[in-house]
Amino acid sequence: MSKAQATRSDILRRAMELIYKQGFQSTSIDDILATTQVTKGAFYYHFKNKEEMGIALIEEAMHTEIWPDIQNSLSTSPNFRDNIYKMMDKLLFKHPFMTVEHGCPAVNLIQEMAPLNEAFRVALKKSLNKWERAIEAEIMRGQETGQLGLSHDAKQIALHIITLYHGVRNMGKLFGKPYYVSFLREFRQYLDSLN
Amino acid sequence: MSKAQATRSDILRRAMELIYKQGFQSTSIDDILATTQVTKGAFYYHFKNKEEMGIALIEEAMHTEIWPDIQNSLSTSPNFRDNIYKMMDKLLFKHPFMTVEHGCPAVNLIQEMAPLNEAFRVALKKSLNKWERAIEAEIMRGQETGQLGLSHDAKQIALHIITLYHGVRNMGKLFGKPYYVSFLREFRQYLDSLN
DNA sequence: ACATAAACATACCAATTAGTATGTTGCAAA
DNA sequence: TTTGCAACATACTAATTGGTATGTTTATGT
């Protein structure tokens, strides 16, 4: 990685941390620069403006942070229910920097920015669609191997699972980690109720 | 209502609108004043600071906006499933100022402010607990009338329903009203799967 | 009618904001 | 070695921010 690429990556990493904790609009560029070796000139060399940096964040950082957990879970065991459950468990409990307190950066950004900025909405939707298709594929694999009836709509279930993830990430902010635990129980029951 | 109370109420109503659409941190006091007949002196006569106004918003406006929909649905029909379904339907489709685009003000505020401000977290949690208990009571009524097995944990189900509401409000920001429709179908199935 | 406090109105301030203008440095090709 | 551009660095600006200081008006009890 060239020095310039490293600078760009430093900006994005630090921006990710701060935006995750404070929100996009409330994180100033000076905030990001203050805790980095980067100056304002460097920032505006790499990004046209704050918005473009946010979009880059979604497309790059987001992708390298959350996607691995998903791919490490799905299609690993023959039982599709176990895989989806493991995916949820990993996202909620095993991620290196996501906390119950601050939730999930993708969920947060959707909440904050989707209504305000079309470019954000498109980038976030694209990112979520990828996840949805991965879950959908796992469910269809379950159907093909006879673990799940063909009458179920795989896409609808996939979206429902993502909806649950969004919900639990928000509820966790109020009720803390114990709610994650009780949610996972309910989630397991939901998966088993699909027959 | 005295003139002073009307002023205070004007501030809160307009603040609600703006905070709902832009978020708490990104709504400035000048924003609120600009579209009201209220001056800064009046604002700071009624509220110590922006934070205190936000707390008042949660406790008052929130309560008069969302609570009626809940009480108008629960305990109206003998079938507890119908009532809970109706509550969800009303909240999602029938509310006078909530839109799919901007979601639910309570959900938004939890997302944004719960990790940043303890007073907000407490006020929001209190507000949500009230809702949770109302749903829980409805479920227990269902158990007492033999519509639902006693082995179910009413509180856990109530929290799960609220989790779903949080999730769908967020997902709606990306996928629009059609997703609400498909979610409601899935929600009906979930309610019926509880036996 | 008048005192007194409640309910405002206006002018201001220091800090912060996104963004720009104008530099400088370092390295790679000629 | 010099030229040229990529990759920064520094200093600045106009606008916006939450909050305050210091007034004026309005209602209300006596």
Image (tube, coloured by chain):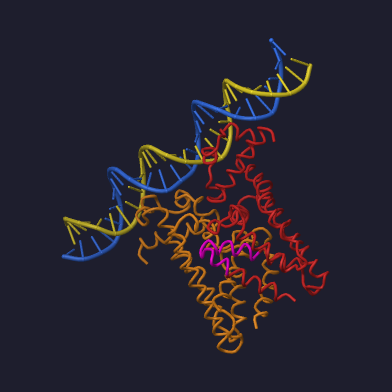
Chain colours: A red, B orange, C yellow, D blue
Relative side of A155 to C16, left or right: right
x and y percentages locating residue A147 in the rendered image = 78, 73
Please name the residue shown 57% across and 66% down the image: A180
Q: Is residue A72 left or right of residue A35?
A: right
- Report the magenta stretch's main SS: helix
Where does the N terminus of chain B fall, quadrant-wise?
bottom left
Label count reads 0
Q: Nearer the viewer, residue A36 or B181?
A: A36
In this rendering, the answer to whether B115 lies above or below B87 is: above
Q: Residue at x 62, y 64 (%)?
A: B167
Percent of width and height locating residue A63: 69, 50
User: Who is closer to the viewer here, B28 or A56?
Assistant: A56
Residue A110 versus residue C8: which sits nearer the camera?
A110
Q: Is residue B149 above or below residue A64?
A: below
**Magenta run includes residue A178:** yes
Q: Residue at x 76, y 68 (%)?
A: A79
User: Which of the 4 image quarters holds residue B111?
Assistant: bottom right
Q: Give the range drawn in magenta.
A: A163-181
Q: In this view of the protein, which residue sits in the foreground, B164 or B23? A: B164
Farthest front residue? A77
Q: Is residue A77 highlighted in magenta?
A: no
Residue at 67% of width from left, 58% of height from top?
B174
The quadrant of the image that shows the C terminus of chain B is: bottom right
Where residue B70 appears, as percent x and y from the top left, is 53, 74
Q: Position of residue A9 (x, y in %)?
A: 64, 40
In the image, taking residue D13 as reference, residue B183 lies left or right, namely right
